[in-house]
Image: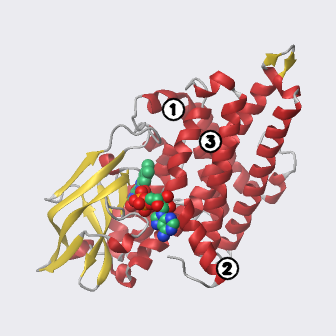
Amino acid sequence: MQNDPIAIDTLFTSDEKLIRDTVRRFVDADVTPLMKDAFEHALFPTPLIPKLAKLGLLGMSLPEALGGSNANAVTYGLVCQELERGDSALRSFVSVQSSLCMYPIFKHGTAAQHKLFLPNMAAGKLIGCFGLTESDSGSDPNSMKTTAKKTSGGWILNGSKLWITNAPIADLAIIWAKTKDGIRGFIVERSFKGFATQEITHKLSLRASATGEVILTDCFVPDSHYLPGSEKGLTAALECLTQARYGIAWGAIGAAMACYEIALDYAKTRIQFNKPIGAFQLIQKDLVDMFAAITQAQLLNLHIGRLKEQGQLNFMMVSLAKMNSCNIALDVARKARNILGANGISLDYPVIRHMVNLESVFTYEGTDNIHHLIIGKQLTGLDAF
Ligand code: FAD
């Protein structure tokens, strides 16, 4: 954060700060200038993909031999934070590619699948999407209707997945489908007969993210594309979501940091009643509350990051951080929008863009209610689902 008033930087290693600052410079120079138009015209800025790959930001937690850089959890978190300072759509793209596509192939796939897909995905040559949600199956993925039936040499998939990030630009999809033995994961390539995507238009949030439907019509998926590690069923999909939610916890605070910093600058220069508005006590209270909330979230994120590095992180802790960051980020964005007055609703400032993006971030990867129930179950021992 600007000036780092409580010296959080002392908690990061020099390597972590170096990567964070490199990504921050990339976002300031190459991303932020594009996002106003990308948002307005609802276009994902695809020219950024090779740049993300060149910086090593796709699948960065994976081993170097598979195209990753063995990045530790805090480094990955800081990268998500910096990317989302630019726009939630960019962080969503990286989260989906890294945590929801490369991670399941790495964790649940075979050595042949690793070799076939991961280096090309790290290089940004193959783009992935993750299909769990359906039109009638959101918070309750067990109710999915997409099926996979065993046939000679492979599987026949039927069904459709809705609200799928990257679907319109994806070369492959990690599809979760019901078999007679339970939910399993499959790598489905765009070139497979019976695979189609349809872009979702008229979104008023995450406009710069390509979101779509994946339609599977008697789509034959060879045995070579079945994820054997998905034999644990829905848990295998939820393990991927835990990875992605971890990055979201950091990312949402990146959007909050951007909103806070813009509001702070604005409050120091906008003159009303012959004074900078930042000199008014009510504005200062909002700025201090924003700063305090961001700081608390940064420290929680850092704590769970270190736990992750020590192998001690569990999904409840990730739910807490994802839920906390989204609530704080939305509140900060709304306060910033208020401080900017009428300019707060203009795309000439990034605040309204972050604010409406965060509505999606609040909902996807487990809604706020669902995270409350996950944490509530852990605290009370009582299952409210
Ligand atoms: P529902 O599950 O219908 O929920 C509606 C409301 O009811 C919510 O407020 C919810 O909290 C509440 N609710 C539901 N059950 C309970 C309960 N038991 N107790 C209390 N309240 C409850 N999905 C993917 O698979 N892949 C993607 O890449 C992906 N990208 C997305 C991108 C965007 C921009 C968006 C908006 C969504 C994306 N999603 C994706 C889908 C997302 O994960 C779902 O929208 C989310 O899980 C919620 O499901 P739903 O929208 O069907 O809402």
Q: Amino acid at mark 1?
A: Met
Q: Quick check: which quadrant has ligand 1?
A: bottom left
Out of 222 and 241, give the one closest to the viewer: 241
Q: Mark 2 CB in 8 Å range of ligand 1?
A: no
Q: Nearer the viewer, mark 3 or mark 2?
A: 2
Q: Secondary structure at mark 2?
A: helix
Disc 3 versus disc 2: distance between alpha carbons?
33 Å
Q: How is the image coloured?
A: secondary structure
Query: Quadrant of residue 155 in the image?
Result: bottom left
The amino acid on which the numbered mark 3 sits, given as a three-letter code, is Arg
Between 135 and 221, the one nearer to me in the picture: 135
Give the residue number, with chain letter if any, for mark 1: 35
Q: Amino acid at mark 2?
A: Leu
Residue at screen point 38% across, 44% down: 210
Disc 2 crowd rating (10 Å Cα; few below 14, some 14-19, many 20+) is few
Say whether residue 165 is left or right of residue 189. Answer: right
Q: Residue at x 58, y 45 (%)?
A: 83
Label 3 sits on residue: 85
- In this image, 343 relative to 43: left or right? right
Cβ atoms at labels 3 and 2 below 8 Å apart: no
Residue 19 visible here: no
* Viewer-closest of 258 and 4: 258
Mark carried by residue 136? none
Residue displayed at 32% across by 46% down: 169
Dot 3 or dot 2, earlier in sequence: 3
Image coords of residue 243 (percent x, y): 53, 66
Closer to the chain start, of discs 1 and 2, is 1
Asked if disc 3 is less than 8 Å from ligand 1, the answer is: no
Q: Look at mark 2 in the image and give the residue it sits on.
A: 379
Rounded to the nearest whole Å, what is the CA distance between mark 3 and mark 1? 11 Å
Q: Callout 1: 10 Å neighbours few (<14), some, many (20+)?
A: many
Question: Which one is earlier in the sequence, the residue at label 3 or at label 1?
Answer: 1
